[in-house]
Image (cartoon, rainbow, N blue to C red):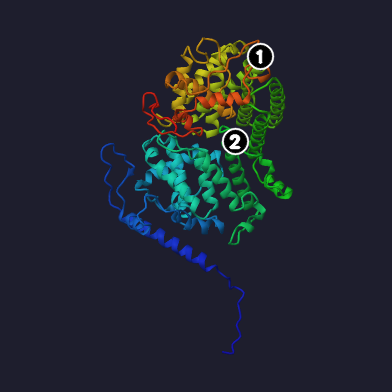
Amino acid sequence: MGHECKISEPFKREHKRKRASEFEQRARLLQERLSASYRPNFEPLAGRAWPSVNSVESARDSRSAERCGQSGVLPSSSFQSTSATVDESHVQQDVVSDDRWEPTVARTINGQSVDPADIDQLFDHFRTAYAPQLPFLDPLKSPNAQYASSPFLFWAIIGVGCRTYARNPTLLAVLAPAVLAAALSTLNSPVTLQTIQGLLTLLHWPFPKTSATSDLLYPLTGALINMAMQIGLHLPISAQEFSKVRLCLDTAEIERRARTWGFCQLIHLRSGVPKGSPAPAVFDIPYDLDERRIMFDNLSAEQKFELKLQDIVNRCCIAASQNGLRVMTSDRERSLDTLLAMFSAQVASIGLDASSDLDRFYVQLAHLCVQSLHLYKSPGSQDPTILFDLSNTCCQVLEFSELIDKASHNGVATSSMWIYINVMLACHVLLRLLKSSLSCSIDTARAQAAFFSGVGLHKRMSLQNDDLSARNGVALTQIWNSTRAFRSPNGSEAVALRVRSRLIGGIILDGIVWWREEFGEASGIYAPPLLDRDDVRTNDPAHGGPSSEAFRNSTSIHASSELFNDPMSNEFGWPVDYDIFSALWDDGSLVPN
């Protein structure tokens, strides 16, 4: 044409795909509001009616289900399509500027609808009872804006809020399976920062697991770490190298990414210790020293403190495993004493930096994890001073847990899974000490009062009748009143651990073994109790005890599928295949091929 093309200064290049996505979001929000305006009254569920959970979907939800292939759960694309644009471009404001003044819209997942009033109260409940423990969520974002930016994170907040939602406690049972299915769908979807935050929320406060559900906590934790590294959270200043779109890596964004990665590491480190598979030390990743320094500089003081403590606990567990716990000799016991004393001193050193009661509580949890490994030694070689310190640590953990329970309305029920595990560990340690001759080395009055308090905490931690806390509370009560616990068939004391490959989880599971043998009719399944005599070191091959080969053969003789058929044991990684409401929790009919 012969005309010169000029670009004026006010001209600004726009990302067409991003702009189109924003228009689609606005259109979808307008459609939802229009549908909500003409939403008919829902029919309540027949029978045991839930006032806020309905199975009748609106016409809009039906059409959406048809477009999605009529799948039972919202498709992964619906959880990620909007969040991918909003998150990676890091638009911090709400998608629609006036959204927070709009009335909350009812939402549906897997055929279950939650009313606007419940959504508002669940968000408020989550902000007050849960969010302070994971302070990376925007407290000002409305439910509508949260759903628009990330439906998965929206349902994660709703699901966790249901755990202690007194206005409608039936929501937890009907929404938990759908929210877990949504979490699994994220594994096959584009990963965003809000996806990671949703998984963190569900893993920090997991849903109660019954005998009819699978244990997804440990596998999802592994997925969480890998998904976080997939978008470069472990390298906050190099995150652009992990993204296809341009990121705004300002100071606030780098801090947000670093702190989210810090929570990922805490969840990852804590999940493996009860399984007997402690994760590698957190300070080894990232490997680049500059990246590592910048990442830790952007963590909060509380995160740094907890990560240091958890790093010591994991290093201690790794060192104890490498020393050998399955068959303890005299040399191994002496080296274990040295290792545990060294790591206890490190925990005490970190504890000097504690600035709050909660920090000091985490110090006690770390001391408990380290000191409890002394129980892997032969009972005859236990140091009374060490047992006294271990008992006092257990008492302090349970006493402070009582203070947590009294400090708020929902109390210990809103605590993290890590606190749950340590409360159970403290109770099983005190039970073993009080029910044996080791009680002569401890303050029995204080230990007994703390143990009874711990049993009561189990009841208040329980969210359902057959969850882990409820079952463990029943087991602790029955073992306490038993005259056969920690006794061999001939009546002699047998307090040595038989479950020896699960670190701190082995102490809990060993107590469950005693419960199963007496109250679950599982005698003859597990290895026989290990006796402890003054003249014979039963764990030492050099003193007449079993060799590692003999020990391995003796346990394999008693192998049976019933060994893995306890729902409480399944909580720690053992599968289950029978009804929790069975009187004996086992049908006793399965024999391995």
Residue type, numbered disc 1: Pro
Residue type, numbered disc 2: Ser
From the image, tell me which residue sits under label 1.
384
Left or right of 31 on screen, residue 494:
right
Q: Which quarter of the figure has residue 169?
A: top left
Left or right of 411 on screen, residue 257:
right
Q: Residue furthest bottom?
A: 2
Residue drawn at (72%, 49%), measured in percent from left and top? 288
- For the N terminus, which image quadrant? bottom right
Cα distance in 3D space between marks 2 and 1: 29 Å
- Give the image location of residue 237, x and y in percent: 67, 53
Which residue is more in the foreground, 274 or 523? 523
Residue drawn at (65%, 10%), measured in percent from left and top? 534
Residue 401 seen in the current view: no
Q: Secondary structure at mark 1?
A: helix
- Give the image location of residue 490, x and y in percent: 51, 10
Residue drawn at (46%, 14%), measured in percent from left and top? 482
- Give the image location of residue 244, x and y in percent: 58, 61
